[in-house]
Amino acid sequence: MASGNAIRGTRIGSGPARFIERGEPAPRQFISYWCANDHETRPSFAMDVQPPETWDCTRCGLPSGPDREAPPDKPHAKPFKTHIAYVMERRSEADGAALLEEALANLRRRRGE
Ligand SMILES: [Zn+2]
């Protein structure tokens, strides 16, 4: 192969490094988060990244959320909300009772068979 020497001229490994040096920074999105103390934190994320629902406040460390009117609860209240908790919050108590009643009825029916 006559072209062997020419290929050897480019060192393997130099390509990727140069690419990173010259690469333009990826476009970023800035998302505002507010904590319960009304501190704003504005982390940036890559455009193709789904921003997290909460972010730790850089000033006081409390969890912050994108909704300024409804910042996340302080940690000692409820650090983690399950999916069920959200569902239960959205439903009225009457709905919840009806659903529970229905579930119990189904259970009794199944047991009766
Ligand atoms: Zn804060």
Image (tube, helix red, strand yellow):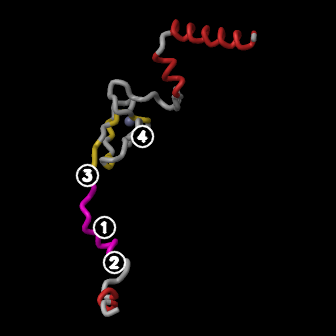
Q: Residue 11's image quarter?
A: bottom left
Picture coordinates of residue 96, whole percent (x, y): 54, 11
State the separation of the CA atoms marked 3 and 2: 25 Å
Decide if ligand 1 comes within 8 Å of the CB at mark 1. Answer: no
Marks 1 and 4 in Cβ contact (< 8 Å): no
Which residue position holds label 4? Answer: 56
Q: Which mark is residue 27?
A: 3
Mark 2 — residue?
A: 14
Which of the two discs, 1 and 4, sits closer to the camera? 1
> Which amino acid, mark 1?
Ile
Mark 4, other Cα within 10 Å: few <14 / some 14–19 / many ≥20: some
Dot 2 amino acid type: Ser
Q: Secondary structure at mark 3?
A: loop
Measured as percent of width and height from the top left, residue 89 is found at 48, 18
**Label 3 vs 2, first from the N-terminus:** 2
Pointer 3 or 4: first along the chain = 3
Mark 1 or mark 2, earlier in chain: 2
Name the quadrant of the N terminus.
bottom left
Which residue is at 53% across, 28% downward?
Answer: 82
Residue extent of the magenta highlight: 14-26
Question: In terms of sequence position, does the residue under pointer 1 or pointer 3 come before the other?
Answer: 1
For image coordinates 29% across by 69% down, the residue present is: 19
Tag 1 residue: 20
Q: In whole angstroms, how far apart are the C-alphas of marks 1 and 2? A: 10 Å
Q: Is residue 83 left or right of residue 53?
A: right
20 in the magenta segment: yes
Q: Position of residue 75 (x, y in %)?
A: 50, 32
